[in-house]
Image (tube, rainbow, N blue to C red):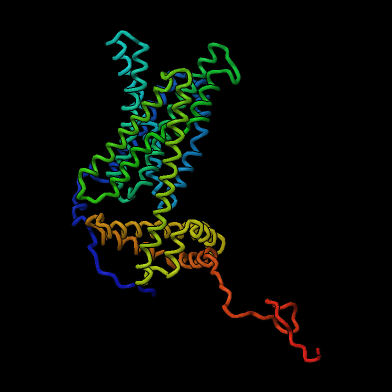
């Protein structure tokens, strides 16, 4: 029987036994049930409201068109999260919150605020403009930020840095934009039905081009600023209380400001929309994309730097820090496990091994920087045991990936002359051949 490397003992119940006496409302099943019920009810209400505004036919058309960018955006955020992939349940919660709860809050609050402003000022057109540029950004970004806050507070182990904040915020905003696009495209289709417009000159085509083709990333871009703020807060030490509070608030304010500029672009003149799009949206999108990719590379470097200590103590094989710090090598390991070591189950075990090892590297990095929590040793032990349970399959696959992905070792030419073998072709370096019969 294999024996794990020696490790200090740890408490079996980190909560000190408090979990055994939890009240019924503190149980996970009760909390999950309440959350699912809340999201389901929000979804039914938002479905009824959107269908009431667009009609059944408009709703179906809007749904069919609005769903087009969702797989691409979800795949992009999942790709960003490949270094330390978070649980699918967090992404499903974030999307459902954005599509159901946040959208419902936005529709009710925006409608109420706009009607109140129109009644108070007796200026309906001015109320619509004020509602779009001031009320909507505050309400919508706050509603979307609530999902990021909930994951940050209640799924803290899964929220360790900037990439996690970007992914949760982006997926939440993708869900929100999905519902909003159904509403806008469905209303546009209803307008075309009344006016008889068809083809590329229709309101539906124009709305589709602006919202789906040109700016499917608009809502994710705004909310990602909030996610970055929470990510920086997650990276901050617990003693930095002010920074941990102010940075997410600053990110939320930036998201509101950019959202307000985007909504107000139509009031900047005939070409105001295109000016804001070219001067602010595209550069901001490029900058944030670069930031997230740079952060991802930084995470891979942390894996390569932090894991060798576990290889030195026998928990990991010597080649594993290199393999786990390379996305290409990770992919090769999973492919080899699927083809040679047992199919999908083996590939899943290797993927889980890679994820646990990455979490271990990030945990150790936080510990060295003084940002780890009081349960550092308990969590470290848990991750090491998860790795040890999967080592038989994972180590074979990772060893293969290490051999396949290792960079070629350059071989320098020796400092002395290299001569060819006598009688076998041309010499490697030209030189006079001695011929005893030549005079």
- Measured as percent of width and height from the top left, residue 425 is found at 75, 78
Q: Is residue 42 left or right of residue 332?
A: left
**Residue 60 seen by the camera:** no
The quarter of the picture where residue 15 lies is bottom left
Nearer the observer, 367 or 40: 367
**Quadrant of image for the N terminus:** bottom left
Q: Farthest residue toward the bottom?
A: 436
Who's the residue at 37% across and 12% down the image? 125
**Quadrant of image for the C terminus:** bottom right
Who's the residue at 48% across and 25% down the image? 274
Nearer the observer, 53 or 241: 241
- Measured as percent of width and height from the top left, residue 221 is found at 41, 35
Nearer the observer, 228 or 376: 228
Q: Farthest residue toward the top?
A: 122
The quarter of the picture where residue 370 lies is bottom left
Q: Is residue 10 left or right of residue 329?
A: left
Image position of 296 with respect to 333: above or below: above
Nearer the observer, 269 or 253: 269
Who's the residue at 33% across and 30% down the image? 256
Q: How many marks?
A: 0
**Residue 107 seen by the camera:** yes
Q: Farthest residue toward the front?
A: 439
- Measured as percent of width and height from the top left, residue 324 is found at 44, 60
- Measured as percent of width and height from the top left, residue 58 is found at 50, 21
Image position of 419 with respect to 179: above or below: below
The quarter of the picture where residue 279 lies is top left
């Amino acid at each position: 029987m294999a024996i794990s490397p020696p490790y200090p003992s740890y408490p079996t119940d980190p909560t000190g036994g408090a979990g055994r006496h939890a009240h019924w409302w503190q149980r996970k099943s009760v909390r999950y049930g309440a959350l699912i019920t809340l999201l389901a009810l929000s979804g039914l209400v938002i479905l009824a409201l959107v269908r009431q505004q667009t009609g059944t036919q408009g709703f179906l058309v809007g749904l069919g068109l609005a769903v087009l960018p969702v797989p691409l955006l979800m795949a992009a955020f999942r790709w960003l999260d490949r270094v330390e992939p978070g649980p699918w349940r967090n992404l499903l919660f974030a999307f459902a919150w954005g599509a159901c709860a946040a959208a419902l809050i936005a529709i009710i609050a925006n409608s109420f605020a706009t009607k109140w402003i129109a009644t108070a000022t007796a200026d309906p057109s001015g109320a619509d403009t004020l509602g779009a540029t001031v009320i909507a950004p505050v309400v919508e970004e706050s509603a979307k930020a609530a999902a990021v806050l909930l994951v940050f507070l209640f799924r803290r182990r899964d929220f360790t840095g900037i990439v996690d904040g970007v992914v949760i915020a982006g997926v939440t905003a993708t869900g929100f934009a999905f519902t909003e696009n159904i509403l806008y495209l469905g209303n546009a289709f209803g307008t075309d039905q009344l006016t008889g417009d068809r083809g590329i000159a229709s309101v539906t085509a124009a709305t589709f081009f602006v919202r789906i083709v040109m700016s499917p990333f608009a809502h994710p871009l705004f909310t990602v600023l909030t996610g970055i703020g929470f990510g920086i807060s997650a990276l901050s030490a617990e003693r930095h209380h002010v920074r941990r509070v102010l940075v997410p608030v600053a990110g939320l304010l930036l998201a509101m400001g950019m959202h307000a500029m985007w909504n107000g672009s139509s009031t900047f003149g005939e070409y105001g929309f295109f000016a804001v799009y070219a001067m602010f949206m595209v550069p901001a999108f490029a900058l944030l994309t670069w930031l997230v990719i740079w952060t991802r590379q930084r995470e891979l470097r942390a894996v390569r730097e932090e894991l060798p200590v576990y290889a030195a103590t026998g928990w990991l094989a010597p080649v594993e820090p290199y393999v786990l710090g390379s996305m290409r090598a990770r992919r090769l390991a999973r492919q080899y496990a699927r083809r040679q070591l047992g199919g999908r189950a083996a590939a899943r075990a290797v993927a889980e091994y890679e994820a646990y090892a990455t979490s271990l590297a990030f945990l150790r990095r936080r510990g060295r920087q003084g940002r780890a929590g009081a349960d550092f040793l308990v969590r470290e032990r848990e991750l090491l045991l998860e790795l040890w349970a999967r080592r038989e399959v994972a180590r074979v696959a990772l060893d293969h990936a290490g051999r396949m992905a290792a960079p070629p070792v350059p071989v320098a030419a020796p400092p002395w002359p290299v001569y060819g073998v006598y009688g076998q072709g041309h010499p490697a370096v030209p030189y006079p051949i001695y011929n005893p019969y030549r005079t």
